[in-house]
Amino acid sequence: MNRRTRLLVLGPLAAASFAAAPAALAAIPQTPPAAVPAATCSTSGVLENGKVHLSGGGFTPGPAYVYGSAGFGGTVEIAQNGGFQVMNVPPGQYSVRQGGELTQCSG
């Protein structure tokens, strides 16, 4: 095939592939952005002193309220990384309320 014939045949094919590329990209299913991780909270096992440590992550920085079945409760400050720790609290079931969200602690 001579050079002129190749250009006449291949030119439109190359142009068509460039025209089809945006349509092909648009047809690829788009995945939604990853969801913000849900806040979590947990207690450690019972320590030698009979207390537990309470910790959590995935919260919004700022104040939150912790309350538990053992009578412990109070405001904690959530750090910029979304986490908190409360050391040496009585064993029990704990929850953290921040805004309208209530997170049950496991452990």
Image (spheres, grey):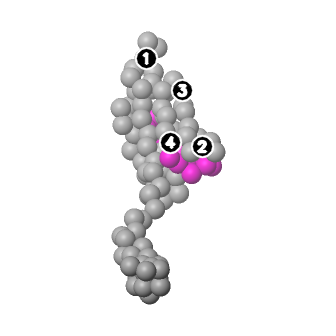
Looking at the image, tell me whether mark 2 or mark 3 is earlier in sequence order. Answer: 2
Query: Residue 65 placed where, x, y %?
Result: 53, 46
Estimate the spatial distance between the alpha carbons at disc 1 and disc 2, rounded to whole Å.
Answer: 26 Å
Which quadrant of the structure image shows residue 21?
A: bottom left
Looking at the image, tell me whether mark 3 or mark 1 is earlier in sequence order. Answer: 1
Estimate the spatial distance between the alpha carbons at disc 3 and disc 1, rounded to whole Å.
Answer: 11 Å
Image quadrant for the N terminus?
bottom left
Residue in the image at 45% along x and 24% along y? 52
Which one is in front, 30 or 32?
30
Pointer 1: what residue?
A: 47
Estimate the spatial distance between the alpha carbons at disc 4 and disc 1, rounded to whole Å.
Answer: 21 Å
Q: Amino acid at mark 4?
A: Gly
Which one is in front, 85 or 68?
85
Q: What is the span of residues highlighted in magenta in the rendered image? A: 58-71
Q: Secondary structure at mark 4?
A: strand
Q: Secondary structure at mark 2?
A: loop
Query: Residue 79 placed where, x, y %?
Result: 62, 42
Looking at the image, tell me whether mark 4 or mark 1 is earlier in sequence order. Answer: 1
What is the crowding at mark 2: few (fewer than 14 residues within 10 Å), some, or many (at least 20)?
few
Query: Residue 28 placed where, x, y %?
Result: 37, 71
